[in-house]
Image (tube, coloured by chain):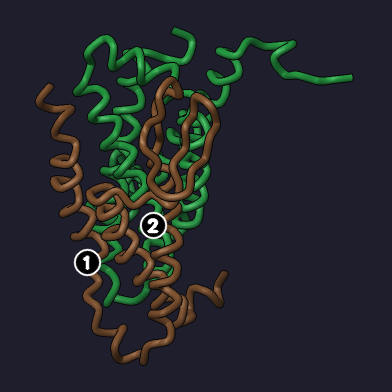
């Protein structure tokens, strides 16, 4: 007996499920990186009081491995749905003349790949968080990754608004 | 994992991988160095750079660029571990965040056709 997932769900639903998983992973990554970036940019030196102070008071070192795993998983999921995007999303976007939308999506693809290759150094620097020699590099590398992640998330959201898998 | 984090060899590998990887990816984009090309319309995979084929839809190079970058950066990282520790100790760590920032305007420029259409 041949089993096909498409006997139970439509092709659009199939790809939309993976797009949603990609988005959920990105949200988790965004949260972790934003917490960590806030903790290095605006460190809290006394017990946290209000919400903003508590947001900044997280121990950033505990996020490093999770950020790496989430970045890789989000990347793999994005790479998986990218083939369908290229045919069913990008071509209609190009036909509609939304060139700048397409341009920022391509920039997102570049920045998340650069983010991927930065992960080994990022992980090492955080796992040696007690070394003062690494403090500056760790701080700014974390901020760069957070900015790239925010850019990727917002662009992905906008592109999905322009044309999603179910459109 | 703790052993990895305290290993000087891993430090050298990680820093070389990240620095070379960022530079190599930009080169892949600028000079077109995909290890393979993928035609999503027909699921055809071609080694190296493959031009678009008539009636086969678009070609994707990004997967090929990623693979070129990952392999190239891994080789660079492994080679760096063979160097004397004094040599790699002198690599400035600010390159880890500065190079990705420098890459942004370069990559933006490489997408100029999208901004000017």
Picture colour for chain A = green
Q: Is residue A70 visible?
A: yes
Q: Are marks 1 and 2 on the same chain?
A: yes
User: Which quadrant: the C terminus of chain B?
Assistant: top left
Residue A5 lies, in percent from the top left, at 72, 19
Indicate the quadrant containing the N terminus of chain B: top left, top right, bottom left or bottom right.
bottom right
What shade does chain B have? brown
Depicted A113 relative to depicted B7: above or below: above
Where residue A54 sits, quadrant-wise, is top left
Task: Say which element carries label 2.
Answer: helix
How dense is the environment of label 2, judged by Cα within 10 Å: few (below 14), some, or many (20 and up)?
A: many
In the rendered image, which quarter is residue A49 located in? Answer: top left
Q: Residue at x 47, y 49 (%)?
A: B47
- Left or right: where B37 falls relative to B94: right
- Placement of A91 over or under A27, stated as above or below: above
Mark 1 against mark 2, which lies toward the viewer?
Answer: 2
Q: Is residue A10 above or below residue A35?
A: above
Mark 1 Cα-neighbour bin, 10 Å: few <14, some 14–19, many ≥20: some
Residue at x 31%, y 66% (from the top left corner): B20
Q: Which residue is mark 2?
A: B69
Give the camera-side residue of B36 and A124: B36
Mark before the other along the chain sequence, 1 or 2: 2
Alpha-carbon distance for marks 1 and 2? 17 Å
Q: Chain of mark 2?
A: B
Residue A124 lies left or right of residue A56; in this view the side is: right
- Left or right? Give the position of A40 relative to B7: left
The x and y percentages for residue A56 are 31, 47
- Residue at image point 81% right, 20% down: A3
Q: Which residue is mark 1?
A: B95
């Amino acid at each position: 007996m041949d089993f096909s997932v498409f006997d139970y769900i439509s092709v659009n639903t199939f790809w939309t499920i993976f797009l949603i998983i990609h988005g959920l992973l990105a949200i988790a990554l965004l949260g972790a990186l934003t917490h960590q970036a806030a903790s290095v940019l605006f460190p809290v030196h006394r017990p946290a009081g209000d919400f903003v102070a508590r947001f900044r008071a997280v121990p950033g070192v505990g996020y490093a491995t999770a950020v790496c795993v989430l970045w890789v998983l989000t990347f793999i999921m994005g790479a998986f749905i990218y083939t369908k995007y290229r045919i069913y999303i990008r071509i209609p976007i190009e036909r509609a003349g939304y060139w700048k939308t397409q341009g920022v999506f391509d920039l997102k693809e570049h920045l998340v790949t650069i983010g991927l290759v930065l992960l080994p150094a990022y992980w090492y620097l955080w796992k040696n968080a007690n070394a003062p020699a690494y403090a500056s590099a760790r701080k700014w590398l974390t901020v760069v990754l957070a900015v790239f992640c925010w850019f990727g998330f917002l662009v992905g959201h906008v592109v999905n608004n322009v044309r999603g898998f179910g459109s | 994992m703790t052993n990895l984090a305290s290993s000087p060899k891993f430090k050298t590998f990680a820093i070389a991988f990240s620095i070379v990887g960022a530079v190599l990816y930009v080169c892949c984009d600028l000079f077109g160095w995909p290890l393979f090309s993928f035609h999503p319309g027909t699921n055809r995979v071609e080694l190296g750079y493959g031009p678009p084929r008539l009636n086969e839809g678009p070609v994707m190079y990004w997967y090929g660029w990623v693979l070129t970058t990952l392999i190239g950066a891994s080789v660079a990282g492994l080679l760096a571990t063979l160097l004397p520790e004094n040599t790699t100790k002198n690599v400035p760590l600010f390159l880890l965040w500065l190079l990705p920032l420098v890459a942004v305007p370069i990559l933006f420029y490489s997408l100029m056709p999208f901004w000017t259409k």
